[in-house]
Image: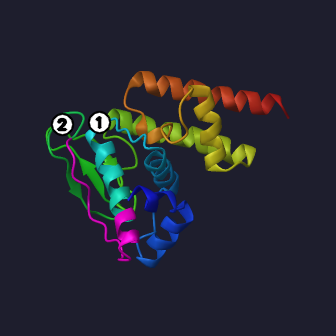
Amino acid sequence: MSNFISDISISAIKSHLIKSNVFNGVDLLFYESVLNEFKSDKLTYKSNMDLAKKNRVFSILIDIKNKRNSVFSPLTFKTHCCSVDVEFFNDDRGFYFCPICGSKVTAHGDFMPMGILAHKRIRKLRVQLHRSLDSFIKEEKITRYKAYELLAKKLKKNVVDVHIGNVTSLSHVVDYYHSIQLLKSEFSNSH
């Protein structure tokens, strides 16, 4: 399998997902980072959910190898908050939730969680962080990816891990908010 993986590119994965009619809502950056982990033989996972997400990418690689379409269903994993089986609710967006504490996270079109499950207060703060980052993107006319690259540098994190959906505590909220404000200040001073 490793020889096969070394020949796969992110564009091959994208083509496969389009052909399978499951490309809508896919975070290719995540797929690419996992593909690179497979290629470097340095596969790690931080949580039960992370392992489930990486297993999904691996199953897509198997589908590519076996020349069969990929079909997606919700992931199964234990919640990080209460260590119980996550539940999935499919409304117009779809989300994962903890049946014990009610922590939630929205899902991409491929059923990949858009971050880490969080309680209502943190989710509301994430929305505010997104608004702040979105205003920076709009004001500076930069791509979302570029904004996350800049934010990752400020936070000293990997660009794949820096997404606001991964904010899980008030201290993270404060760090992200200050970093976004610093970026806004630095950019406004450079004009």
Residue found at x 31% / y 59%: 94
**Residue at the disc numbered 1:** 119
Residue found at x 62% / y 27%: 154
Look at the image and say whether residue 73 sits in the magenta stretch.
Answer: yes
Residue 100 visible, this orientation: yes
Residue 127 x, y percent position in the rendering = 46, 42
**What segment carries the magenta color?**
61-78
Depicted 102 relative to depicted 110: above or below = above
Q: Quadrant of residue 44?
A: top left
Tell me the number on the disc at residue 17. Answer: none
- Precedes in sequence: disc 2 or disc 1: 2
Q: What SS does tag 1 mark?
A: loop
Q: Residue furthest front?
A: 3
CB under 8 Å between callouts 2 and 1? yes
Residue 117 x, y percent position in the rendering = 31, 41
Look at the image and say whether residue 114 sits in the magenta stretch.
Answer: no
**Disc 1 marks which amino acid?**
His
**Residue at the disc numbered 2:** 101
Q: What SS does tag 2 mark?
A: loop
